[in-house]
């Protein structure tokens, strides 16, 4: 199965400044802007916003 450019791999970095990252996929047609998700940061030990970096 080929990887497509419409669902690229994106890296989400914590806004708490801990350097922790998540890796996910997103659909470029539905969300062309950078995504922000609230996820758990185990270094900060709380939920923080994770922003997409390119």
Image (cartoon, grey):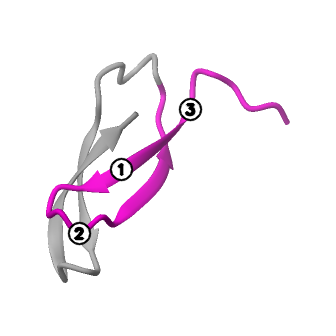
Which quadrant would residue 32 be assigned to in this image? top left
* Place of residue 15 in the rendered image (x, y in percent of width and height, measured from the top left): 17, 56
Left or right of 23, for residue 7: right
Q: Residue at x 23, y 69 (%)?
A: 18
Left or right of 9, for residue 37: left
Mark toward the viewer: 1 or 2: 2
Pointers 3 and 1 in contact (C-beta within 8 Å): no
Dot 2 lies on which element?
loop
What's the distance in space between the residues labelled 1 and 2, CA to CA?
A: 12 Å
Residue 32 higher or lower than 51, as above or below: above
Q: Residue at x 85, y 36 (%)?
A: 1
Residue 41 higher or lower than 45, as above or below: above
Pointer 1: what residue? Answer: 12
What's the distance in space between the residues labelled 2 and 3, CA to CA?
A: 24 Å
Classify mark 3: residues with Cα within 10 Å, few (<14), some (14-19) or many (20+). Answer: few
* Place of residue 37 in the rendered image (x, y in percent of width and height, measured from the top left): 25, 50
> Which is nearer the N-term, disc 1 or disc 2?
1
Mark toward the viewer: 2 or 3: 2
**Which residues, given as a range, are shown in magenta?**
1-27
Between 4 and 12, the one nearer to me in the picture: 12
Dot 1 lies on which element?
strand
> Which is nearer the N-term, disc 2 or disc 3?
3
What's the distance in space between the residues labelled 3 and 1, CA to CA?
A: 13 Å
Pointer 2: what residue? Answer: 18
Residue most extreme to the right:
1
Q: What numbered label is drawn on residue 8?
A: 3
Which part of the image, by quadrant, shows the C terminus?
Answer: top left
Classify mark 2: residues with Cα within 10 Å, few (<14), some (14-19) or many (20+). Answer: few
* Place of residue 3 in the rendered image (x, y in percent of width and height, measured from the top left): 74, 32
Q: Residue at x 42, y 59 (%)?
A: 22
User: What is the count of numbered marks?
Assistant: 3
């Amino acid at each position: 199965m080929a990887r497509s450019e419409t669902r690229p791999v994106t890296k989400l970095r914590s806004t708490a400044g801990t350097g922790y990252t998540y890796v996910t996929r997103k659909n470029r047609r539905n969300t062309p802007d950078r995504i922000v998700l609230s996820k758990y940061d185990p270094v900060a030990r709380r939920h923080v916003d994770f922003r997409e970096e390119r």
